[in-house]
Amino acid sequence: MTLARVEEFVVPLELVDKTLEPLQKAGQRGYEAFVLWGGRFTGDATRFEFVSAYFPEQRTSRGEEGLLITVDGEALFRVNRAFYQRGLTLAGQIHSHPTDAYHSDTDDTYPLMTLIGGLSGVVPDFGDGGRARVDEWAWYRLVARMGWMTVGDETRIIFR
Ligand SMILES: [Zn+2]
């Protein structure tokens, strides 16, 4: 089954809370942060449910275009292994911004989630306001030959 065919992504709200915790903590120090989501197909090939959030070892540095987060290959390998051992696929990445939520050029160029059809969410204001503001997250999807595209009607993201 391929992520490219998924029409509906299910996101449990407790996963949102687990994700916001490290994002808010990093934000208090003025840093952006990344959390990776693992999940599995449920029922058929058009429905995918995220079940696990993983906060990988990461470093933040200040570059010309703002903050750059680096997760080295070894740390990324550990994430993938942890998901794989539970039968999960790394299909989502979530990261925070100090203010507006959008995919920057840096975000387009250095994703951690690299599967076609996977999701990338950007959280505004370092996650201030918690899950109540989850509808303000900006969502993008990695599309074959097109790169990162804003999520539209073809994709439903269901929080529950
Ligand atoms: Zn970004």
Image (cartoon, rainbow, N blue to C red):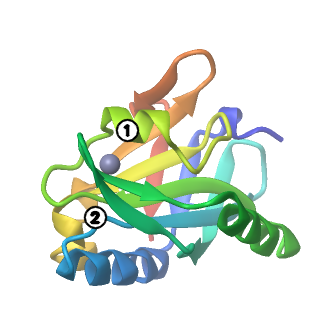
Position of 40 with respect to 52 (left or right) is right
The answer to whether 69 is drawn above or below residue 65 in the figure is below
Residues tagged 2 and 1 counted as in contact (Cβ below 8 A): no
In the image, is the residue at mark 2 within 8 Å of ligand 1 by its beta carbon?
A: no
Q: Amino acid at mark 1?
A: Thr
The answer to whether 125 is drawn above or below residue 140 in the figure is below
Asked where in the image residue 60 lies, by quadrant, the reply is bottom left
- 2 vs 1, front mark: 1
Asked where in the image residue 23 lies, by quadrant, the reply is bottom left
In the image, is the residue at mark 1 within 8 Å of ligand 1 by its beta carbon?
A: yes
Please tell me which residue lies in front, 111 or 39: 111
Asked where in the image residue 40 lies, by quadrant, the reply is bottom right
**What is the x, y in percent for residue 115?**
68, 40
Per the image, the residue denoted by label 1 is 106
Local crowd at mark 1 within 10 Å, few (<14), some, or many (≥20)?
few
Please tell me which residue lies in front, 125 or 117: 125
Quote the CA–CA distance across marks 2 and 1. 23 Å
| Residue displayed at 21% across by 80% down | 29
Q: Secondary structure at mark 2?
A: helix
The answer to whether 84 is drawn above or below residue 6 in the figure is below
> From the image, which quarter does the N terminus lie in?
top right
Q: Secondary structure at mark 1?
A: helix
**What is the x, y in percent for residue 127?**
24, 71
**What is the x, y in percent for residue 79?**
70, 69
| Residue displayed at 23% across by 75% down | 27
> From the image, which quarter does the C terminus lie in?
bottom left
Per the image, the residue denoted by label 2 is 134
| Residue displayed at 19% across by 81% down | 28
Q: Amino acid at mark 2?
A: Val
Q: How many marks?
A: 2
Local crowd at mark 2 within 10 Å, few (<14), some, or many (≥20)?
some
Please tell me which residue lies in front, 28 or 39: 28
